[in-house]
Amino acid sequence: MAVLVTLLSLVATLAGGLVALRARDKLHLILGLAAGVLLGVVAFDLLPEMFEQNAYHVLGVPAVMITFAAGFLTLHIVERGTAVHRGHEHEYESHGHHYPTVGVLAASALVAHSFLDGLGIGLGFQASTAIGATVAIAVIAHDFADGFNTFTITSLYGNARRRALTLLCLDAVAPVAGAAVTLFVHVPQSVLGLYLGFFAGFLLYIATSDILPEAHARHPSRLTLGMTVLGMAFMFVVVGVAG
């Protein structure tokens, strides 16, 4: 089931790349919705579930909250260390088109992140079908933006379109590979709770540091904000029905 669901993630990633090639005028609305979906998954699904999966404390602090913070900081450190500036195209312009290797490295970081997304879906299904389904919805929503960014970053640093398309395809396949790994690895419940905390931190960072700023950068409209609220409301209903 997890592998089959990640095929939708593959399609979403390729669709994001297609938008980067064709039309960008409605991207802010799609990203606003995606950010709301991610925030909804974190607030209504992952946070409650991780406390149920793991009740351990470290120095009085829930262990899952430590991994939650670690997940947020890990992605922040990775992005700062690999020059991944998601979605702020004006920042790339100052770099010019003279550093194609930087573009490849940045896009490769997104591919690795997509692999972890697939891993998250697979581990979510190990917890329960409901958790797996809601995590998958969140991943699929933001993989659209990943596909867009993979193609854009690679191209803006001076790489040929063929190379950008190759990295886009790798980014699309990566979640499927990550989910496939979980078919052969079973994670104990207590460890799974820690991972869900870590993954929730990942998603919170993506929503607040990457997708929301990108959605509002050029179109700070009430409609974009409304799409974010709609995304959260959608996940509230999905989690409620799944529960």
Image (tube, helix red, strand yellow):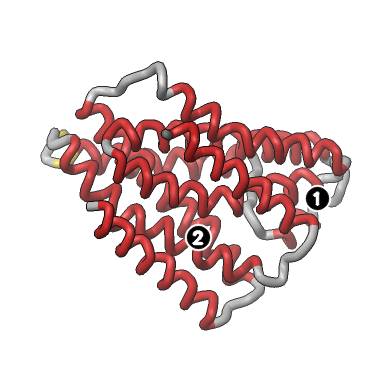
User: Looking at the picture, how far across and down is residue 117, in whole percent?
Assistant: 48, 38
What residue type is disc 1 on? Leu
Residue at the (26%, 58%) spot, across then down: 241
User: Looking at the picture, how far across and down is residue 208, in whole percent?
Assistant: 46, 59
Q: Nearer the viewer, residue 44 or 214?
A: 44
Residue at the (60%, 53%) spot, across then down: 145
Asked where in the image residue 224 lies, by quadrant, the reply is: bottom right
Apparent side of residue 193 relative to residue 152 in the rendered image (left or right): left
Image height check: is 17 above or below 78? below
Q: Which residue is mark 2?
A: 34
Neighbour tally class for label 2: few under 14, some 14-19, many 20 plus, Cα within 10 Å:
many
User: Looking at the picture, how far across and down is residue 238, in whole percent?
Assistant: 33, 58
Q: Which residue is mark 1?
A: 156
Residue at the (82%, 38%) spot, across then down: 100
Image height check: is 47 above or below 64? below
Q: Earlier in the sequence, mark 1 or mark 2?
A: 2
Residue at the (50%, 66%) spot, across then down: 33
What residue type is disc 2 on? Ala
Q: Nearer the viewer, residue 43 or 14?
A: 14
Element under label 2? helix
